[in-house]
Image (cartoon, rainbow, N blue to C red):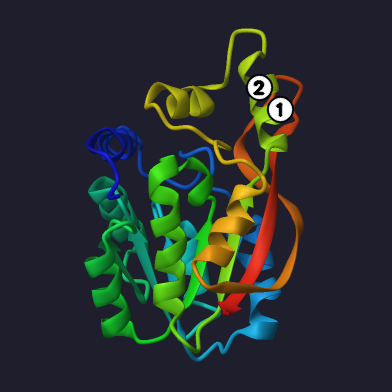
Amino acid sequence: MNVSDNYRDNWESYWKETADGRGEAIWDADPSLSAAPHSELLLPYADPDRTIIDLGCGNGTQTRYLATRFARAVGVDLSHAAVEHARRAADGDPVEFQQLDLTDTDAVRALHERLGDAHVYMRAVIHQSEPAARPRVAAAVAELIGAAGRAFVVELTSGSRDVLGRAASEPGGPGPKLQRVFHHGLKPADAADGEIPRLLAEAGLAVLAEGETVLPQTEYLTDGTRIDLPARWFVLAPA
């Protein structure tokens, strides 16, 4: 199944209404809190001379950091508007961005044929994908790493729903960044905890390492506490 028109439109409208600038999206954390520590977990298993593909790159903040750790970084996103954000923000940095639907098997295969076996960085994509589309998202990871690449996948766990629930029930309601997520019909932490490892295994991916973490957000509760969403990370190889 490809993504529905409604899902695609939700992401397109979200990014069209998001201003340029670091941190405007709630998940647009500084790389020192995201791609940097994630790279440290991936690099013991991954050849830095390979290309790395940032799946669901958004405005490209993490992609630009990954370009400093790997030979080449390519960011892809379902949303055309997100890709335009990323290209503007790159401002001459040696990174590449393109629109890509991860459930479009032919398009994913074409990207693999162009780049060869690559590494994959995927931060919080499966958990908010439509349920019927999630197996294809996992399969896209396997397709892109081929026989020699490695993947770093981090996804929200069910504990994130509790954190988001508390944030939504703040006096005055959720903060403006979280409010926009809900307004555009996006569904964070929608996947069950056991679903992510099952989908990865069914896609032909083997877990080399895994652990618990949080994904820091760019919004804070009224008491000044940063919203950190519980997550689980996986370093993956072809099974």
**Residue 210 placement (x, y as % from top left):** 73, 65
Tell me if 35 is positioned left or right of 75 in this view.
right
Image side of residue 48 versus residue 42, left or right: left
Horizontal and vertical percent position of residue 43: 65, 81
Q: Residue at x 55, y 87 (%)?
A: 48
- Res. 52 visible in picture: no
- SS type, badge 1: helix
Residue in the foreground of this view, choosing between 36 and 181: 181
The foreground one among 60 and 126 is 126
| Kind of residue at disc 2 | Gly
Question: Could you tell whether 124 is left or right of 78 in the image?
Answer: right
Residue with the mark numbered 1 = 162
Could you say where residue 236 lies in the image, as x and y percent from the top left? 60, 73
Q: Is residue 226 visible?
A: yes
Q: Is residue 90 left or right of residue 157?
A: left
Residue displayed at 67% across by 36% down: 160
Residue marked by disc 2: 165
Q: Secondary structure at mark 2?
A: helix
- The residue under the point 34% across, 59% down is 102
Around disc 1, counting alpha carbons within 10 Å, would you say few (fewer than 14), some (14 to 19), or many (20 or more)? some
Rendered position, 143 above or below 123: below
Asked if the residues shown at circle 1 and circle 2 are in contact, with their CB atoms under 8 angstroms apart, the answer is yes
The three-letter amino acid code for the residue at tag 1 is Asp
Q: Quadrant of the C terminus?
A: bottom right
Q: Is residue 209 above or below residue 154?
A: below
